[in-house]
Image (tube, grey):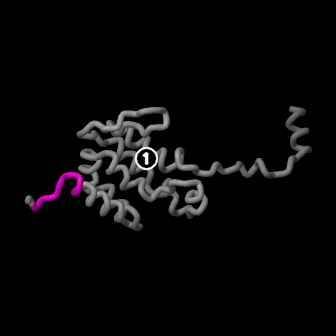
């Protein structure tokens, strides 16, 4: 048979190595600037997006255990969004949305950026909502009386 790799095998191999680079400190800037990253995002948007989102927490329990420095929002979000917005996918996403919870079709750079941000802030993965620190303070009746008198 042929000795060459299929397109999906090559793309999967590339995504795995780019994900490994992304996961190591210092590798993010390299991944953001590699032509292979751009090519992967254009030819297989969902797989390319996974390079940036694979390390994101996927459950509420994972979100609770994450360290601040490992929070996806601390991992170059502006640069990732700018890169994703610049992408013009070469193929249409094969999965049309079935319902409101279906993933966005990744047929534009903006759709890639929105999907990345949804993952980074944990919209569908149970990121706990932080209580406002002021909600747990005891009431200050003197201040409330002063404010009511204004």
Please say if 39 is above or below 64.
Answer: above
Q: What residue do we see at 29% from left, 48% from top?
A: 41
Q: Is 134 on the left or on the right of 110, as rendered?
A: right
**Label 1's element?**
helix
Q: Disc count in the image?
A: 1
**Would you identify the image quadrant in which residue 64 lies?**
bottom right
Residue at the spot 91% in from the left edge and 44% down from the top edge: 142
Considering the image in quadrants, where does the N terminus appear? Answer: bottom left
- The structure residue drawn at horizontal position 87% and vertical position 43%, both measured from the top left corner, is 143
Q: Quadrant of the C terminus?
A: top right
Position of residue 86 measured from the top left corner of the image (x, y, whole percent): 31, 42
Tell me where the magenta segment starts and ends, as one range.
3-10
Other-residue count near label 1 (Cα within 10 Å), few / some / many at <14 / 14–19 / ≥20: many
Tell me the quarter of the picture where residue 26 sits.
bottom left
**Which quarter of the figure has residue 93?**
top left
Asked if the magenta segment contains residue 9, the reply would be yes
Looking at the image, is 57 positioned above or below residue 21?
above
Q: Per the image, is 49 magenta?
A: no
Viewer-closest of 114 and 29: 114
Q: Residue at x 39, y 38 (%)?
A: 111
Please name the residue that numbered disc 1 is placed on.
116
Q: Give left or right: position of 135 versus 106.
A: right
Q: Left or right of 126: which side holds 85?
A: left
- Where residue 116 appears, as percent x and y from the top left, is 43, 47
Q: Residue furthest front?
A: 1
């Amino acid at each position: 048979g042929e000795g060459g790799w299929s397109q999906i095998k090559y793309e999967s191999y590339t995504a795995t190595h780019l994900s490994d680079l992304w996961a190591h400190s210092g590798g993010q800037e390299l991944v953001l600037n590699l032509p292979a990253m751009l090519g992967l995002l254009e030819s297989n948007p969902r797989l390319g997006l996974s390079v940036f989102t694979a390390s994101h927490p996927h459950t509420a329990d994972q979100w609770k255990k994450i360290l601040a420095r490992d929070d996806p929002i601390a991992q170059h979000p502006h640069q990732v969004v700018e890169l994703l917005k610049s992408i013009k996918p070469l193929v249409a996403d094969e999965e049309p949305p079935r319902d409101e919870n279906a993933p966005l079709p990744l047929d534009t750079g903006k759709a890639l950026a929105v999907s990345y941000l949804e993952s980074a802030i944990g919209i569908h993965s149970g990121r706990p909502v932080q209580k406002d620190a002021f909600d747990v303070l005891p009431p200050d009746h003197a201040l409330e009386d002063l404010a009511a008198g204004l």
